[in-house]
Every structure is written in C-alpha cells, then in structure tokens.
C-alpha cells in the first residue's frame, strides 16, 4: 500500500499526497525530500535535500 501523506522530518507537519502521484504542487510549495531515505522537509523548515547543478538530490 502506498503512503497517503508525507511528514516533515523536523517539525512533523503533514501534507497529503495526491492520488495521481503528481507531486509537483508539493515541490512548488517548498517541500523537499529524499524518499529513499525517508527524509522530508516542509517549506518552513531547513531543507533535508539540496539539488546540485546536474539535478542530483543530495543531503546538505
């Protein structure tokens, strides 16, 4: 069963995931994550991931 929400690793605020799995509105709102490591950050918290010039997602 796929998750229906994500939770900020730092402050525990929750955001619902869309049924169609289009996460673009979460990215646009400022959410960042490394799903393979279960790390998520909401727009209000420091990022748990940065994106380098080549588009790779890295832990800060």
Image: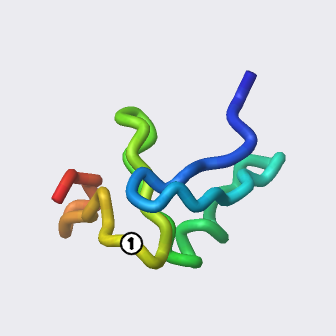
The answer to which quarter of the image holds residue 29 is bottom right
In the image, 14 versus 59, the foreground residue is 14
In percent of the image, x 45 and y 40: which residue is there? Answer: 35
Residue at the farthest front position: 11
Q: Residue 34: x percent and y percent?
A: 38, 46
| Residue 59 falls left or right of residue 11 | left
In percent of the image, x 72 and y 47: which residue is there? Answer: 21
Q: Residue 48: x percent and y percent?
A: 30, 58
Residue at the farthest top position: 1
In percent of the image, x 48 and y 75: which residue is there? Answer: 43
Quadrant of the snapshot with the C terminus? bottom left
In the image, 6 versus 2, the foreground residue is 6
| Residue 5 falls left or right of residue 20 | left
Quadrant of the snapshot with the N terminus? top right
Residue holding disc 1: 45
Residue 47 vertical placement versus 14 (above, below): below
Residue 17 vertical placement versus 41 (above, below): above
What colouring does the structure picture have? Answer: rainbow
Under circle 1, the secondary element is loop
């Amino acid at each position: 069963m796929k998750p229906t929400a994500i939770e900020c690793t730092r402050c525990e605020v929750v955001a619902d995931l869309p049924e169609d799995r289009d996460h673009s509105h979460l990215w646009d709102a400022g959410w960042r994550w490394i799903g393979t490591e279960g790390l998520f950050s909401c727009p209000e918290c420091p990022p748990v991931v940065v994106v380098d010039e080549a588009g790779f997602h890295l832990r800060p």
